[in-house]
Amino acid sequence: MNAIEVSRVYKSYGAVQALKGVDLAIEEGEFFGLLGPNGAGKTTLISILAGLARAQSGYARILGRDVINNFRAARHALGVVPQELVFDPFFTVRETLRIQSGYFGLRRNDDWIDEIMFHLDLSEKADTNMRALSGGMKRRVLVAQAIVHRPPVIVLDEPTAGVDVGLRQALWKFILRLNREGHTIVLTTHYLEEAQSLCGRIAMLKQGEVVALDSTHRLLASVTGLQLVLRFQMNMMPVGLQAPWLPDSQRDEQWTWQLSDYEKIEAILNACRLAGGVLDHMEIQKADLEDVFLQTMLDVPVCA
């Protein structure tokens, strides 16, 4: 059974078509990335899964439960960390999590609440009113609310936006533990290095359509671009270097060549030596998820 199944989902807001027949299947236990530029339809898709918006056609299911026809079971199986900071200003952190537990019929949930607060570094703020928390602390509470009923499927919509490095590390350590225990994790983020290191598979949305869907490894392998970055002693580029060995760009006293494979590296280095260049620094950069994203979304070529 798939953790999430979306089939031919369309959604419009007036003249704006937010989703154009999206098909997506996410297996149980996956750590899945849902990426795309602003306005691509990611939050609309999450809203449909969470029951906050209704698709005009198609269907969405959480662990086989239709989000419309079996909405109670579907919502019980799902925890969502929203992008916006939404909170009730009249309760403390602990009261907020107890109330959230009550929504799902959970009594005597304090042991799990204490564990969540410990892992998200909220223990010292347990009796603090939500109004008094910083933005980063409020976001931690949103994460805690999403998982307080132990949902098998967890959707994180920009969970680390505007938070410090310490929280990111603590959050991902805890979320990875939940994933190892069998929870399905769906992540949307603009921090592509997070998606590259965490997600086993990635889907990319563009203007309401899935334009790429594959394992992270295969997506990275699809971009063959390399960058050779050189810096010369005394910051002096060898004046005798001739085409076709001239660099493609120069920035911060470093010269960069865009390459399609490793074979051209030795030829460039040899040409630099023959021209009298003495290297001070050399770096070979492989394509990363940002390169895949740019190539897929913006049609920006990675290599010349």
Image (cartoon, rainbow, N blue to C red):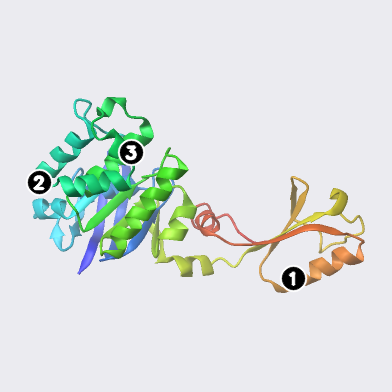
Q: Nearer the viewer, mark 3 or mark 1?
A: 3
Residue 70, numbered label: none
| Residue at mark 2 | 108
Q: Position of residue 58 (x, y in %)?
A: 20, 57
How crowded pointer 2 is (Cα within 10 Å; few <14, some 14-19, many 20+) is rated as few
| Residue at mark 1 | 264
The quadrant of the picture occupied by the N terminus is bottom left
Residue drawn at x 28%, y 40% as measured from the top left: 142
Q: Quadrant of residue 270?
A: bottom right
Tell me whether circle 1 and circle 2 mark residues in contact (CB < 8 Å): no
Q: Determine whether the residue tagged by mark 3 lies in a helix, strand or loop.
A: helix
Q: CA distance from mark 3 to mark 2?
A: 24 Å
| Residue at mark 3 | 139
Q: Amino acid at mark 2?
A: Arg
Q: Position of residue 282 (x, y in %)?
A: 74, 60
Q: Nearer the viewer, mark 3 or mark 2?
A: 2
Nearest to N terminus: mark 3 or mark 2: 2
